[in-house]
Image: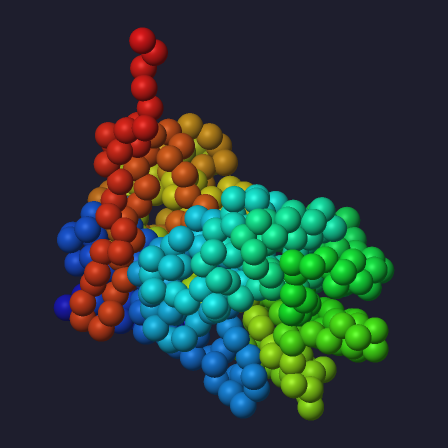
């Protein structure tokens, strides 16, 4: 009989649990997944994806609205197909993301296109596909879009992304709604820019958009921004520029460690209040809150290296697989797939890359031996999409667990694939 496993069962991934000492996702032992598909592998739970999307749908029930999943958080076709089947729209930031959405069965007429640097070629693709709306971020972009639409003999649906100048109180790298940011058009310039857009013959003004930042844990800044947007919509209506939709962006945070993000319904309640009794369609662009806690990164310990001041667990995943710790000093929970009671020690969990910034977690108490598996939790958002091939490392495989089945939704890259597009000099 094994010693009882006293590890936490309050992990942020809702479909993760432990039975007979083994960590499981939707009941499937993660050790079996590693044996079948190798490591490092991103593993996602379809039930968790569906529950996260369901929470948004439920909180918006009865309100004309569209949830446009922010593809940048995790753009795997398998994930996109789950959301497409649930009726989601999509928020894209490139022609590449548009192609993924369409390949996964997403509908172009539910796609909104965000981003400060859309190229003419991307605009053309999106117009040809018939997307729902361009979230335009500058006067110059309005002019480009008008010209591309003219070439195609069509009118481009637009919303202006305004910068409401509120402090989202999040990490400076992921806050976007303050004056000093490159994003959106200044609130004070918005009216003038709408007038200009209204005068351009190949644009059709459809709405207004904003996005103030990511990993928001307090609904108040977003509610403040929403109030500003509503006032702008009223001013525009008074000038004869009525808007059909209001896009409130993404940003809802998740629990990585001990954060207490609001439930979707509590995050939305003050926003719905701001727009109560009005009939504009409300759009949202959540990314992290739909996928972050539906996924983990499964990795194997190659070496345990005791050090003078600390111990290292050197694993086969690295900063190229999950950049968030190196980039934002982000905290991801690390859990033994099968713990070895009695061997607990403090470790830095690091990868094999030649950089001191190559760590996944620091100062964690783990009960492990060489060859054991670790799960790096809350890695479903901005994990795989921000990965790279640094050090000529093939990127991880991706697997979606669905009940008792596990489906590879991205095969592991092979080394020859990594340089297949390269040539030696003649
Ligand atoms: N809409 C726009 C215009 C955005 O820029 C973003 C995220 C979203 C929606 C989705 O936000 P979410 O609901 O996921 O917070 N790599 C960083 C996060 C960057 C977020 C960029 N924009 C991280 O790993 O924390």
Residue 293 visible in rendering: no
Residue 137 visible in rendering: yes
Q: Is 90 in front, or is 413?
A: 90
Q: Residue at x 32, y 34 (%)?
A: 393
In the visual, does 278 lie left or right of 314? right
Percent x, y for residue 58? 48, 85
Percent x, y for residue 104? 33, 61
Q: Residue furthest front?
A: 153
Q: Residue at x 45, y 58 (%)?
A: 129
In the rendered image, which quarter is residue 353 located in? Answer: top left
In the visual, does 370 lie left or right of 181? left
In the visual, does 287 lie left or right of 394? right
Task: Examine the rendered structure and indicate whether residue 369 appears above or below residue 19.
Answer: above
Q: Residue at x 38, y 69 (%)?
A: 84
In the rendered image, which quarter is residue 247 located in? Answer: bottom right
Q: Quadrant of the C terminus?
A: top left
Q: Residue at x 45, y 46 (%)?
A: 386
Q: Is 65 in front, or is 120?
A: 120
Q: Is 414 in front, or is 6?
A: 414
In the rendered image, which quarter is residue 234 located in? Answer: bottom right
Percent x, y for residue 123? 55, 50
């Amino acid at each position: 009989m094994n010693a009882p496993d006293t590890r936490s069962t309050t992990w942020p991934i809702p479909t993760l649990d432990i039975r007979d000492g083994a960590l499981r996702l939707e009941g499937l032992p993660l050790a079996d997944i590693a044996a079948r598909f190798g490591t490092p592998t991103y593993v996602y739970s379809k039930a968790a994806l569906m529950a996260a999307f369901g929470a948004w749908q439920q909180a918006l029930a009865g309100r004309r609205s569209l949830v446009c999943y922010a593809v940048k958080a995790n753009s795997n076709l398998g994930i996109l197909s789950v959301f497409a089947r649930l009726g989601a729209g999509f928020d894209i930031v490139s022609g590449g993301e548009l192609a993924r959405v369409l390949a996964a069965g997403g509908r172009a007429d539910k796609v909104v296109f965000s981003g400060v640097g859309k190229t003419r070629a991307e605009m053309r693709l999106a117009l040809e596909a018939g997307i729902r709306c361009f979230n335009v971020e500058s006067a110059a972009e309005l002019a480009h879009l008008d010209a591309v639409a003219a070439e195609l003999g069509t009118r481009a649906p637009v919303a202006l992304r305004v910068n409401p100048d509120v402090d989202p109180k999040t990490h400076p790298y992921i806050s976007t709604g303050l004056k000093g940011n490159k994003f959106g058009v200044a609130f004070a310039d918005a009216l003038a820019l709408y007038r200009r857009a209204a005068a351009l013959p190949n644009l059709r003004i459809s709405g207004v958009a904003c996005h103030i930042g990511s990993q928001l844990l307090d609904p108040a800044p977003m509610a403040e921004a929403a109030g500003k947007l509503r006032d702008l919509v009223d001013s525009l209506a008074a000038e004869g520029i009525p808007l059909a939709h209001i896009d409130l962006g993404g940003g809802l945070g998740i629990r990585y460690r001990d954060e207490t993000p609001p439930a979707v319904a509590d995050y939305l309640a003050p926003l719905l209040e701001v727009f109560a009794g009005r009939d504009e369609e409300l759009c949202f662009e959540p990314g992290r809150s739909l996928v972050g806690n539906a996924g983990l990164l499964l990795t194997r310990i190659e070496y345990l290296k005791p050090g003078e001041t600390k111990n290292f667990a050197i694993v086969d995943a690295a900063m190229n697989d999950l950049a968030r710790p190196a980039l934002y000093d982000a905290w991801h929970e690390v859990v033994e797939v099968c713990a070895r009671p009695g061997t607990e020690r403090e470790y830095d969990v690091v990868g094999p890359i030649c950089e001191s910034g190559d760590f996944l977690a620091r100062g964690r108490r783990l009960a492990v031996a060489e060859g054991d598996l670790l799960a790096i939790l809350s890695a479903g958002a901005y994990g795989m999409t921000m990965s790279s091939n640094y050090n000529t490392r093939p990127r991880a495989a991706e697997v979606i667990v669905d009940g008792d089945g596990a489906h590879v939704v991205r095969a592991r890259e092979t080394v020859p694939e990594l340089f297949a597009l390269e040539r030696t000099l003649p």
